[in-house]
Amino acid sequence: GPVICIVGARPNFMKMAPILRAMAAHIPPMPVLLVHTGQHYDKDMNDRLFEDLRLPRPDANLEVGSGTHAIQTAEVMRRFEPVVDAHKPSCVAVVGDVNSTLACALVAVKKGVPVVHIEAGLRSYDRAMPEEINRILTDQISARLYTTERTAEDNLVREGIPPERVCFAGNVMIDSVVFGRANARSATETLRACDINPLVLSHPMGYGVVTLHRPSNVDKPETLRALLGVLAEVAASLPLVFALHPRTRSNIDRFGLEDLVDPARMVLLPPQGYLEMLGLMAGAAMVLTDSGGLQEETTALGVPCLTLRENTERPITVEQGTNLLVGRNRAAILGAVQEILAGRGKRGRLPEFWDGHAAERIAADLYQWLMSSQSGIAL
Ligand code: UD1
């Protein structure tokens, strides 16, 4: 049967696109069925990303939409089960750590279908993060696990996962950066198209890019207010361009925080396409974010990144890349911004196997693994 590949939320798209290409280019080609759970249904967040990443149209869309964690996870499971029954897949491939990842993995493993987890073994060691729960549980029920950095295998082995299930393949997210860079839309073009204040475009320091969407940062009015307050201070020395996740957009409105956004220095943009986002990041003086993916993309692009979280599941971006953890601490954030503006930002280097070929390594290994008897006995 085919390899069923799952995407659900925005960060899954950049990871799955290169894998689908590599499986199609494999000799012999590997049969694939692409399932979109519909966890993210926003038109902007879907159509443009699919187009930018040249993702094929999904073979099935489960249209689960939003809900509590329980409802969303349960709906994915309920709707994914008949797809597995109908197609008798050789395995189910999931990426990352969103609710769709865990839900589909759980359906597959209980049907005796091997689960393949791409981006396995990342740990923030913060179980208040829903993604951390999704990572731990998905890894536990996966038969083949592909990692993006060496420390991930240590994490997995500590949790009792046999090392022979683990394969260090590199970072598929960076495959997409390499693929997209050639066609990335220039930052000037993107910003002009958004009709933003010309003061932002002509600032001698350039601009910074901000994204925020973690529940821990944006769901409480006082936390979001404090963060926007610090960002307003940053904006006094560097104009900021926000690419707003729908959750954050609606919370800014709901909590009445619009007044913290000075339009001459801070620009709120709707979610951007992938090629726009790459261009904006590549041209930025720095990126301030709570996203996992952006920590990796900035390291690949060599752009300084300040992560507005207390921890990261991607320690290599701090050890080798351009990333610095600053949490929500005002002094730490402002100090780090000034360092970067003074030209003393982290330079960083490219981690091992973040080379644009991770998906090819995964397809080659997965094919061998499926052909061998291992897939059967791994369960
Ligand atoms: C999800 C992932 C998170 C990932 C993020 C990337 C989980 C637990 N979280 O978080 O790891 O970093 O995606 O974007 O899976 N909404 C829309 N339109 C959409 C999708 C969401 O308006 O297309 C709004 C809705 O108000 C919804 C809220 O965003 O209730 C949260 O969406 P949800 O899919 O539950 O989680 P994210 O916060 O997007």
Image (spheres, helix red, strand yellow):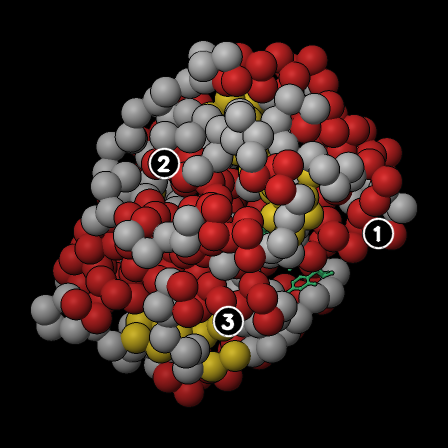
Residue 82 against residue 259 in the figure, above or below: below
Q: Is residue 317 visible?
A: no
**Label 2 C-beta lies within 8 Å of the nearest ligand 1 atom:** no
Image position, residue 86 (x, y; %): 42, 87
Quadrant where the N terminus is found in the figure: bottom left
> Whole-percent x and y of residue 61?
52, 79
**What is the CA distance from the residue labelled 2 to the residue labelled 1?**
33 Å
Q: Residue 332: x and y, percent? A: 64, 15
For label 2, count other residues whose C-alpha is less than 10 Å away and answer few (under 14), some (14-19) or many (20+).
Answer: many
Residue picked out by circle 2: 301
Question: Which circle marks residue 47 in the picture?
Answer: 3
Q: Residue furthest bottom?
A: 86
Label 1 sits on residue = 253
The C terminus, quarter of image: bottom left
Return the residue nearer the eye: 194 or 268: 194
Disc with the residue nearer the chain's start (2 vs 1): 1
Q: Amino acid at mark 1?
A: Asp
In primary-sequence order, the first of circles 3 and 2 is: 3
Distance in Å between CA atoms under marks 3 and 1: 25 Å
Q: Is residue 301 visible?
A: yes
Point 70% across, 24% down: residue: 236
In terms of secondary structure, where does tag 2 sit?
A: helix
Q: How many neighbours does mark 1 have within 10 angstroms: few (below 14), some (14-19), or many (20 or more)?
A: few
Q: Mark 2: which amino acid? A: Leu
* Above or below 210: residue 373: below
Gap in angstroms between the C-alphas marked 3 and 2: 25 Å
Looking at the image, which is closer to me, 329 or 2?
A: 329
Q: Which residue is at the front of the view, 300 or 270?
A: 270
